[in-house]
Image: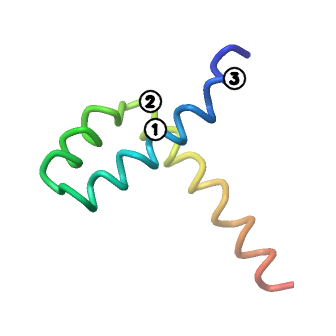
């Protein structure tokens, strides 16, 4: 439950890193690489794999 409380902070931090990448691509990409963990990549991939069929089914109806 404690990790879910920090979800907003993590999302805002990630958005800031993306915005920083636009302003200074070299430094921004370094921060983005440091922030991305294997666990985060697995969660993202799982979300995409689960969300894609759901989105397609809603798009058809």
The location of residue 10, given as percent across then percent down, is 52, 33
**Which residue lies at the image location 36% right of the left edge and 53% below the top edge?**
18
* Residues tagged 1 and 3 counted as in contact (Cβ below 8 A): no
- Disc with the residue nearer the chain's start (2 vs 3): 3
Q: Is residue 53 left or right of residue 46?
A: right
Q: Is residue 26 placed above or below 41 in the rendered structure?
A: below
Q: Nearer the viewer, mark 2 or mark 1?
A: 1
Is the N terminus in the top left, top right, bottom left or bottom right quadrant?
top right
Q: Where is residue 34 in the image (x, y as percent from the top left)?
A: 26, 32
Query: Which residue in the structure is indicated by mark 2?
Result: 39
Q: In this figure, which residue is indicated by the disc labeled 3?
A: 5
Q: How many residues crowd around disc 1 within 10 Å: few (fewer than 14), some, or many (20 or more)?
A: some
**In the visual, does 38 lie left or right of 27?**
right
What distance separates the C-alpha of mark 2 from that of mark 3?
A: 18 Å
> Disc 2 versus disc 1: distance between alpha carbons?
17 Å
Q: Position of residue 15 (x, y in %)?
A: 46, 49
The reply, left or right, for residue 31 in relation to residue 3 is left
Report helix, strand or loop for mark 2. helix
- Horizontal side of 3 relative to 12 (left or right) equals right
Relative to 14, say whether 1 is above or below. above
Q: Which mark is residue 13?
A: 1
Taking the spot 58% from the left edge, 55% from the top edge, the residue there is: 49
Q: Disc 1 on helix, strand or loop?
A: helix
- Snapshot quadrant of residue 56: bottom right
Which is more foreground, mark 2 or mark 3? 3
Structural distance between the alpha carbons of marks 1 and 3: 14 Å
Quarter of the figure with residue 38: top left
């Amino acid at each position: 439950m404690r990790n879910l409380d920090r979800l907003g902070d993590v999302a805002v931090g990630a958005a800031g890193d993306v915005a920083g990448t636009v302003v200074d691509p070299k430094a921004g990409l370094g921060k983005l690489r440091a922030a991305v963990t294997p666990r985060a990549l697995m969660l993202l991939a799982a979300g995409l794999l689960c969300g894609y069929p759901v989105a397609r089914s809603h798009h058809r109806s």
